[in-house]
Image (cartoon, grey):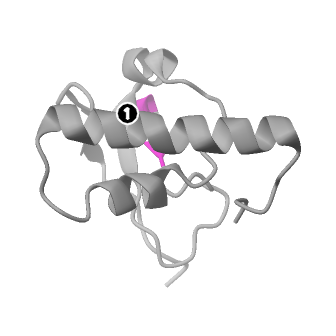
Amino acid sequence: MWGRRDPKEVTCIACGASLDRPDAREYDKEGDRWERREKEFEYLCKPCHRELCHQPRRGLESLLADIEAESVPAGRFVERYYDAVKDDCEAEERGDRSGDA
């Protein structure tokens, strides 16, 4: 009646540990955990959450989806990711913010 209920027990997506929901940290692959409408969150245990890079992930999920659009060997995937991130960093250094979403 007052909204959805969180599960009582969740699984850490990084290590697979089962833990009580209050002991877990929410992970939002879209990077905006404050926008809660029509989302299903994944969870991390506290040690795995501490290991995360907490820098903004501006466009990371869409970048990964674009790179992964066709099936490629892992080495080629990493090359594509590096090239895409390098291009974005160079554009940012030039002050070209047109790639921002």
Q: Residue at x 37, y 62 (%)?
A: 66
x, y (%) of residue 90?
A: 70, 36
Residue farthest bottom in this picture: 1
Q: Residue at x 70, y 60 (%)?
A: 99
> Visible in this render: residue 89?
yes
Secondary structure mostly seen in magenta is strand
- Magenta residue span: 23-27
17 or 64: nearer the viewer: 64
Residue farthest right in this picture: 95
Q: Residue at x 19, y 31 (%)?
A: 75
Element under disc 1: strand
3 or 63: nearer the viewer: 63
Callout 1 amino acid: Leu
x, y (%) of residue 33?
A: 60, 54
Residue linked to disc 1? 44
Would you say 51 lies left or right of 59 here? left
In the rendered view, tell whether residue 33 sits above or below residue 18. below
49 or 92: nearer the viewer: 92
x, y (%) of residue 57?
A: 59, 43
In the rendered view, tell whether residue 54 sits above or below residue 70. above
Task: State which quadrant residue 86 falls in.
Answer: top right
Crowding near pointer 1: few (<14 within 10 Å), some, many (20+)? many
Q: Residue at x 52, y 58 (%)?
A: 30
x, y (%) of residue 98?
A: 78, 63
> Visible in this render: residue 21?
no
Task: State which quadrant residue 17 falls in.
Answer: top left
33 or 72: nearer the viewer: 72
> How many numbered marks, from 0 up?
1
Give yes or no for residue 25 being in the magenta stretch. Answer: yes
Quadrant placement of the C terminus: bottom right
In the rendered view, tell whether residue 77 sits above or below residue 48. below
Give yes or no for residue 40 being in the magenta stretch. Answer: no
